[in-house]
Image: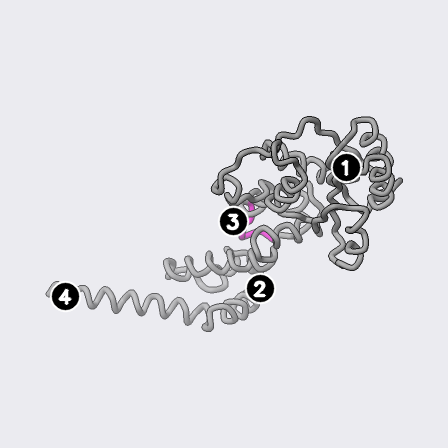
Amino acid sequence: MIVDDEPLEREVLSMIIKKEKLAIDQFVEAKNGVDAVYLAKQKKIDLVLMDIEMPVMDGVTAAKIIKKDLPECHIIFLTANDEFSFVDGLIPREVNDYLLKPAHPTDIVQALLKHIPIQQRPVLNSYEFHEPYRHPEIDKVIEYIKENLHLDLKLDALASMVHFNGQYLSRLFKQETNHTLTQYITACRLEKAKHYLSYSSEDKVVEISKKCGFIDSNYFARVFKKYEGISPSQYQQQIFSNRKKRINSFSNFLM
């Protein structure tokens, strides 16, 4: 059973579980602790993936009631609270495991597999289980960024595009790519700028900065120098100078 008050969270978790074909006989969802307690008792649920902070009844209270009625039920907590002391006190008695949001799909699958009886576990070879997995929503964001570097790419607009809130997208993007959104956008813009600087002798630095989404050319120059160690103009001159030397060298070789 998946228990979370956010419909999108339930949808993503359901997608991950169904994709991995974990041999789960019945699959139900609940939007708060009260529903979770009712469904757990009615359906005799033996494995629960549950958020802690929810309206009506929180996950901690629900876990206590479920464990009292169904002591063999395994409960895995999901929490956005990264203060381990907040969760650690609950682990010995109220919960079998916990994951920090946004949890990576591989971590979710591993946590679930630990609490599924061995005879019911699906047979997965090492390649299938460790194959890199990335949320499709992150792929959509990355594709949009690469195709629209000239635009003013705002966090809220990107989050809205994939129906996430800004904070969730920011955390998930960092987890999936090891870069913040700002770092990733800046890196992509700089790579595009280097391409223009290398192959377009007619475009001025001001024009190139605008094409790459840097509205302020002075800011573009500062960022470029910070990452590349030289100014955009110096980079362009260096590229064309080296290219000219190679052409001259080749010409001398042919003579």
Residue occupying the far right of the picture: 56
Mark 2 highlights which residue? Answer: 216
Quadrant where the N terminus sits is top right
Q: Nearer the viewer, residue 174 or 61?
A: 61
Tell me the element at label 4.
Answer: helix
Name the residue type under label 4.
Answer: Phe
- Name the image quarter holding residue 160: top right
Distance, label 4 to label 1, CA atoms, is: 78 Å
Quadrant where the C terminus sits is bottom left
Mark 3 highlights which residue? Answer: 146
Q: Does the magenta stretch include residue 151?
A: yes
Mark found first going from the N terminus, 4 or 1: 1
Name the residue type under label 3.
Answer: Lys
- Name the image quarter holding residue 47: top right
Query: Which region of the structure is painted magenta?
Result: 144-152
Is residue 89 among what the camera can see? yes
Mark found first going from the N terminus, 3 or 4: 3
Tell me the element at label 1.
Answer: loop
Name the residue type under label 2.
Answer: Asp
Position of 55 compared to 151: left or right? right
